[in-house]
Image (cartoon, helix red, strand yellow):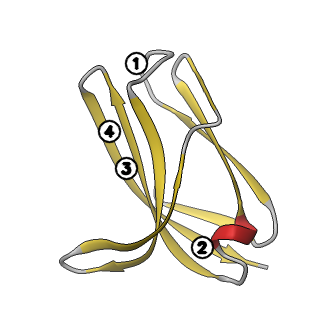
């Protein structure tokens, strides 16, 4: 993942395919942050989003843009999955526009 382009005022269904993931990982979430500062990394946690659905190899996250970004702007995300000790950290940018 790199950059997600999202229209303000919509509900987003984000589907993520994880090769080799079981149907019940120990932990899965997306964290949304307001800022990314070098060299400290992501800062000012806005929200943690749990998965809506998990099936064999795929995770669905659903969130409302009105809560995260009611106006155009940029936020940063971190996807974290722990599946029986196999950990995934993926970072991405979210660009909100009208």
Residue at 65 percent across and 36 percent down: it is 52
Instruction: Determine which of the numbered discs, if any, sits on residue 90 in the image.
Output: 3
Instruction: Determine which of the numbered discs, if any, sits on residue 95 in the image.
Output: 2
Residue at 24 percent across and 24 percent down: it is 85
**Mark 4 nearby-residue class (10 Å; few <14, some 14–19, many ≥20):** some
Q: Position of residue 38 (x, y in %)?
A: 23, 80
Label 4 close to label 2 by CB (< 8 Å): no
Helix, strand or loop at disc 2?
strand
**Mark 1 nearby-residue class (10 Å; few <14, some 14–19, many ≥20):** few
Residue at 51 percent across and 21 percent down: it is 57
Between the C-alphas of marks 2 and 1, the distance is: 29 Å
Which comes before the other along the chain, label 2 or label 1? 1
Q: Quadrant of the C terminus?
A: bottom right
Label 3 close to label 4 by CB (< 8 Å): yes
Figure check: 62 above or below 56:
below
Instruction: Determine which of the numbered discs, if any, sits on residue 52 in the image.
Output: none
The residue labelled by disc 4 is 88
Between the C-alphas of marks 4 and 2, the distance is: 23 Å
| Numbered disc total | 4
The residue labelled by disc 1 is 20
């Amino acid at each position: 993942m790199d950059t997600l382009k999202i229209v303000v005022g919509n509900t987003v269904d984000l589907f993520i395919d994880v090769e080799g993931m079981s149907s019940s990982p120990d932990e899965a979430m997306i964290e949304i942050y307001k800022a990314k500062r070098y060299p400290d990394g992501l800062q000012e946690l806005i929200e943690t989003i749990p998965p809506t659905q998990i099936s064999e190899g795929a995770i669905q996250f659903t969130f409302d843009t009105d809560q995260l970004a009611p106006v155009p702007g940029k936020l940063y995300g971190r996807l974290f999955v722990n599946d029986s000790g196999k950990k995934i950290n993926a970072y991405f940018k979210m660009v909100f526009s009208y």
